[in-house]
Amino acid sequence: MADIALENWNADKIRGQRDRFLGELRLLGVDENELEASTERVIEALCRVLDDETGCWLLQDHAEAASELPLTIDTPAGLDHVRLDRTFVDEHGTRWIIDFKTSAHEGGARTAFLDSEVERYRPQLERYADAMAAIDRRPIRVGLYFPLLQAFRNWTPGNLQCPESSDRY
């Protein structure tokens, strides 16, 4: 969606891609018994992005934007290959690294759930930030976006403070 101008997308266009999503999920090895439900989940997540100001902001056209950007890090243990779901530079010159999560959460304690997901994925995003910092000296922020929940958590890598949970970036 980010590669084709976001304003060209709507719920009908997303639903029209159903067979494509199903085929791609099949190629990724999703079990045949789960294909239908997984395809519906993809459609729901993408439609929710369009209905969310933050989701649209993440996918809109930004400077140096890239989706599924592969990077290689030279570590003491050898080469480490990573793939960034989304990265861009905002109007303030900050490099953003976004990881999309299709987690769903039923019931209460939504804030606790999101906090636990931040802690779960913090090492991964901090590794991505290290990879980007090797080639980009701008300030970096990382974030997790949950399209099914229309929730966004972001922080400055290495910062020990709690991540920001507001709807503003």
Image (cartoon, rainbow, N blue to C red):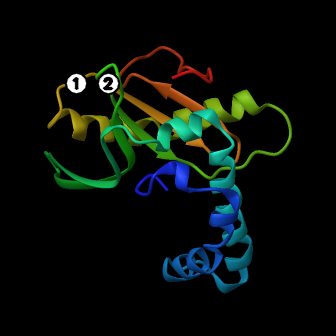
Q: Which residue is mark 1?
A: 138
Q: Position of residue 150 (x, y in %)?
A: 67, 39
The relative height of residue 100 versus residue 10 in the rendered view (above or below) is above
Residue lying at 62% horizontally and 46% vertically, measured from the top left: 49
Quarter of the figure with residue 23 = bottom right
Q: Along the line of sight, which residue is nearer the eye, 51 or 78?
A: 51
Q: Residue 119 placed where, x, y %?
A: 53, 33
| Amino acid type of the residue tagged 2 in the rendering | Thr
Extreme residue in the right direction: 107
Residue carrying label 2 = 94
Between discs 1 and 2, the one toward the N terminus: 2
Q: Tell me the distance, in whole angstroms, between the alpha carbons under discs 1 and 2.
A: 6 Å
Mark 2 crowd level (few <14, some 14–19, many ≥20, 10 Å Cα)? some
x and y, in percent, of residue 9 in the image = 58, 56
Disc 1 and disc 2 in contact, CB within 8 angstroms: yes
Check the image and name the residue furthest to the front: 8
Amino acid tagged 1:
Arg
Residue drawn at x 15%, y 36% as measured from the top left: 134
Query: What SS does tag 1 mark?
Result: loop
Identified at 48% across, 14% down, the residue is 161
Tell which of 140 and 48 is nearer to you: 48
Q: Residue at x 36, y 25 (%)?
A: 157
